[in-house]
Image: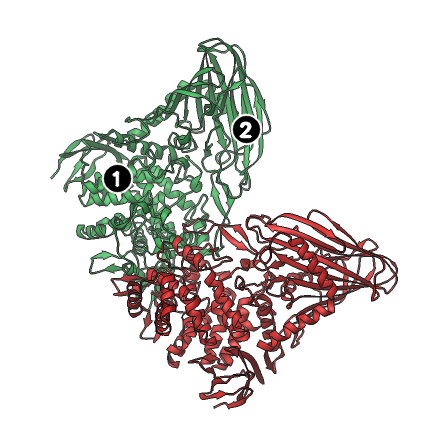
Chain colours: A green, B red
Amino acid sequence: MTDSRFQSDEWKIIETRFEAERGRDSESIFALGNGMMGQRANFEETYSGDTLQGTYVAGIYYPDKTVVGWWKNGYPDYFAKVPNAPSWTGIKVRIDGEELDLAACKIKNFRRELDMKEGVLTRTFTAMMPSGRQVEVTAKRFISMSQPERAAISYSVRLTGGSGTAEIIPWLNADVYNEDANYDEKFWENESAEHDGARAVVVAQTRKTAFVVATAMENTFTVNGKPAKSKASITTAVNSAHCTFTSAYAEGDTIEVKKYVAVLSSFNHPAEGLAGKAMSMAGEAARKGFEAMLRDHTKAWEKKWEHGDIVIKGDIAAQQGIRFNIFQLNQTYTGEDPRLNIGPKGFTGEKYGGSTYWDTEAFAFPFYLSTADTHVARNLLLYRYKHLGKAIENAQKLGFTGGAALYPMVTMNGEECHNEWEITFEEIHRNGAIAYAIFNYIRHTGDQNYLAEYGLEVLIALSRFWAQRCNWSQEKNQYVILGVTGPNEYENNVNNNWYTNTLARWTLKYTSDSLEWLRSASEVKYNSVVARTRLDTQCELSLWKEIINNIYLPVHYDLGIFLQQDGFMDKMQQTVKDLDPAERPLNQHWSWDRILRSVFIKQADVLQGIYFFEEEFDEEAIRRNFDFYEPRCVHESSLSASIHSVLAARLHDTESAYTLYLRTARLDLDDYNREVKDGLHITSMAGTWLAIVEGFGGLRISNDRVCFNPVIPAAWSSYSFIIRYRNNPLRVEVNGSAVNVVNLSKAAIPLAAYGEKLTLQPGEKKKFKKS
Amino acid sequence: MTDSRFQSDEWKIIETRFEAERGRDSESIFALGNGMMGQRANFEETYSGDTLQGTYVAGIYYPDKTVVGWWKNGYPDYFAKVPNAPSWTGIKVRIDGEELDLAACKIKNFRRELDMKEGVLTRTFTAMMPSGRQVEVTAKRFISMSQPERAAISYSVRLTGGSGTAEIIPWLNADVYNEDANYDEKFWENESAEHDGARAVVVAQTRKTAFVVATAMENTFTVNGKPAKSKASITTAVNSAHCTFTSAYAEGDTIEVKKYVAVLSSFNHPAEGLAGKAMSMAGEAARKGFEAMLRDHTKAWEKKWEHGDIVIKGDIAAQQGIRFNIFQLNQTYTGEDPRLNIGPKGFTGEKYGGSTYWDTEAFAFPFYLSTADTHVARNLLLYRYKHLGKAIENAQKLGFTGGAALYPMVTMNGEECHNEWEITFEEIHRNGAIAYAIFNYIRHTGDQNYLAEYGLEVLIALSRFWAQRCNWSQEKNQYVILGVTGPNEYENNVNNNWYTNTLARWTLKYTSDSLEWLRSASEVKYNSVVARTRLDTQCELSLWKEIINNIYLPVHYDLGIFLQQDGFMDKMQQTVKDLDPAERPLNQHWSWDRILRSVFIKQADVLQGIYFFEEEFDEEAIRRNFDFYEPRCVHESSLSASIHSVLAARLHDTESAYTLYLRTARLDLDDYNREVKDGLHITSMAGTWLAIVEGFGGLRISNDRVCFNPVIPAAWSSYSFIIRYRNNPLRVEVNGSAVNVVNLSKAAIPLAAYGEKLTLQPGEKKKFKKS
């Protein structure tokens, strides 16, 4: 089914060979995280081979100085990066003075296993050291999902081939760098280390932003399963701490350390006293013990799977792929803190700086909306709400006034970080996705009150932006939006991108309608919103209405399609089939200007709009657009195929939907783009979830009703998923002939499948036969 | 008339106050050069204040590593910079151990004088040193126009206020840096110094490109006008050489040094033996002596002025301004070496790297064509001819094939240096200016044979580019050119820029016509061109014809204007008058996206095309376009106003022409843009010349005839210029009522003025009365 490096398994990712040249790849694949911190699968013991050391703490960032070839007015001064944080995984192993280093050993029985059900990473191997000494190692670690500032490692070494003295040295290190630093700057300063009894801590502070991170450890040692007789000795240097356990060993002895770690940051605690607090927490963890911590952790993961597992029968690679994606999405974002968001690579690498992109609202949002408690999606909305002031400032920098907001393309704290004019200043459709997420949230959750409390403030600021950003064209006798970049970044600075204009119009309309609804629902709340936003209900609303009624949306009447932008039909009309495969991907083979003037599309653009507003178009219109644009799309964004897959399924073209689905399902596991070494494509993983649940499953929330219209790929015998509608879980199982829906909640749920409408009572199960 | 820092003078630039904060400005203004080397007006004596040390040697470059925010496929790896070369102007002055440093002195009678007639820079001042010692200095220097690798400085110090010991120390230094190095890299390596008798030399080699420069000096000393009795002692360090002359002085004594310098580079000589050769040359200069060298130098300048002076009566500031421009153009490029070209800042600063831009063909070319011997302009054409192979490679990198050429936007050796996709890849109209220069050259010189020898090879490669760069639009049923940037860089990535499409069409036509002409003129030469270019005379020529006949040129029929590009009329229509003056210049006040989507134009775009092909349009068409575009043009390029001025004069709007002329006439002298510190706007100086000769003077070469249609600004009583037509000098004098033309040559010259046609015999003078 797949030529993956990893064994087929429903719940596990299993690597059985040590491949030094794929070391970074595996470090990404086997990364762990819990929404508060993350860790690449770096080896515990010393490793002199190629590695990307990666320890990340959520919310912490460093404003790395902008690099630019030619400065354009309005560029931001910095690009926020998630700094590689003080390292806590290290455990040195020294046998008779010889240090264990897999880059120098002969290795047998290497096995790395990520148990996605429990969130545990295990690694075992037998290493023949250059001296001939042999050790068998079992390392097991997890980052607690139940106590999110803690982690634990169990590391055991069995010594064969003689006797002598062994040293096991867990350590911490605050002297860390980012590979992607623009000017080789160090992001940390004021590093220190201290110890107290059996515990040690290292502390470091980010330069400029002054975030403090304290990383503490306590370690316990056993020999052949019994508590060690000798004590470990702790030493600290300026920015590191070592805990050295020395023991005589005889043939066949096993020495084991349990390393309990606490990682605290000033993002969540006062900076003062952080070191002591971290040491106490590491101590608490040690007292609780590895197994007890692991039980709580596993229980938390059980709950995550209960909320959002997808089961695929008949295709174990697909099963593994989707679970890997769900697992990583849950490792990245747990939704407990509205100051956090979803970096495109989560906690698995440095690239893209761990910052927030429109990926969140356009691709990742529906996953959390359907698989987690309502407050999780709400916190994603609140993240943008909290950044509204900065978004208004951002728009001001570009010349907008009166409370208009332009959310940043890339951000950590609400400020814009990105510096390509064609993206930063022109890819303004991101504002539309932020409005759409509010609509989507309310549609799913029924939480209309969010509009009055927060949503309308954002919507009004977005509408103000659109109203200023369009201009009247005397030539067209309509409003136009000039100089934008659509989702298809293989076009820049175009006029009247249909997707952007459509979102602009829709936002104005949704804002107006929402205001109208609130006015009738609660005069008090309406007045409060108007007062808070200083909305001029006369002038502003009538201008918006004027634009809604008169905005230009490019259409090609002969072809019966929406036109991606003005002039699109002037291009040489080709399809992807006309391309020489040797020239793919285009972005590695064609010069940028050639890409720009070609007809080829990077990712869904018109089709992204049709995906958002599907109900507004009849099936034939969707088909004409799909048939025109899909053959021109090279899917060179990891976010592309999934949206196309959803639409293909909508058009009952299961085969195309499945082909497209396969392009993203195991993108990282099978490393299609040879870039997994840099980290995982977290946000595109949500696209794969969309392709199953909204694509094959056909899930739509329409007029306060959960609707399905499932299809099933020929390769699968059945698939099922659990989603939450207004916080009520539903289990949906699809096979070749029917869809079975079970209401797992305590509320009645209005349902439709294959056109049949009914209300499913609590606990009720219903089979809908495929028509 | 002007609030210039400089005194009014017809032939001189005179500064009478020492203003430390304008130090860099004056270093640019008073820069010297001779086409082979250039030197900012850095002080000879030590100066601890703010300064940009600038010594430049023609042809030498360093490939400075590209800086880029976000890499796009096709970007070049380096940006060629003219390195700041080993310094030769230095003369330390030490009085009783106290070093003369104007930053530490009280200064009286400061005067700096650039004599443009003779090309000599003189500086005098009286300085009160911190100790109270007083010195009167006169420094005079020139870079020889007759012996272009030599320079000489005469530096005399009169000592008042006591007696003691003075040291005068001429020095050389090869330990030099560029301020504009992208990564603070040093551009030089392998520095060395040596001396031999009275001479010393420093040698340095550019890293990567391995150009060697040897800079030698010999010095002679006098005391009170008599040869010094004591000898100077020479010392060398790793990369510097000092010649120390020590003398007792009494009240009122004058010590003078004459420093003779030779600067040789491996661009012109074998690297081996360069140091010895430089020392010999410095020695020869010393033997010849300062006054004799100066006489030769002055004579060479006399000839330059004889070829191309402009005399303006009644406006001394204008007279000074135009002479300054002519002087600088002649200092920058002498046309003796087809490997050299005209950097936008010449030898007066680091900015723009001393590289070649389209400025050469579009703006500077006509100046040299009309004011110098024919071979000068021919060498400018040969420069591009020699780069044809690189231009073809450059096009290949962007996906073009079959010998299509795209000349670089910025280059030193034919390779592209610039890295902004919207400029580098899309500002392709530069190809058109290169074709136009060939046409212009032949029209002026009658040297048709250039086509057969060189011109057609370039034209065919350019035509191949255009034929591939356009594509057939099914929608328009015409050929289109998508994704370009026109001369107006306040628009990027537009479709069907009228100027670009017009140049493309014209190039195809001119190439076809030239081939046709050659075929009838010489079958042998025609066949040779066809063979050398492997031209497919069937397919390629018929495709070109097809494109010539069917290329889309955007027009707005209602307004009767050519449309700058598709969609231009969708913009909010405003004029410059609508702008808040506080927001000017736009490029410093508006974000880039706002500039792009606005209607405002940086520099002539449609009007540049009308300027080039004026004969193809009737006066009313020119007027409609001028009246539409000029009010939308913010003239934020130094190249803009002059082209507009020429067209305004063409439309008999002398007042507008003069207003526009004033925007560039003294751009650097009066530092309109507060950036003269970085260097002079050399190429835009040619625009000022155009505004007078082609604008007010109305010079056109049309059907082998020199035509004038002069107007005169109200502020001037008369103006006259000398131009060469087919190497025959003509003097043209315009006053309020007539134009007087004198044929200074030995050939009959066909003439037209105010519509009257005749042939002017050698020596003949003719007065054309204004109609």
Residue B632 in sight from this viewpoint: no
Q: Position of residue B505 (x, y in %)?
A: 35, 68
Which residue occupies the extreme top position in the image? A250
Which residue occupies the extreme left position in the image? A771
Of residues B195 and A506, the one nearer the viewer is B195
Q: Position of residue A668 (x, y in %)?
A: 34, 35
- Residue pointed to by mark 1: A661
* Label 1 to label 2: alpha-carbon separation: 45 Å
At label 2, the amino acid type is Val
Q: Secondary structure at mark 2?
A: strand
Q: Image check: A285 left or right of B17? A: left
Of residues A316 and B499, the one nearer the viewer is B499
**Dot 1 or dot 2, earlier in sequence:** 2
Of residues A172 and B243, the one nearer the viewer is B243
Q: Position of residue A400 (x, y in %)?
A: 43, 58
At label 1, the amino acid type is Tyr
The N terminus of chain B is located in which quarter?
A: bottom right
- Which residue is found at the position 32% from the left and 59% from the top? A496
- Residue pointed to by mark 2: A202
Q: Nearer the viewer, mark 1 or mark 2?
A: 1
Give me the chain letter of mark 2: A
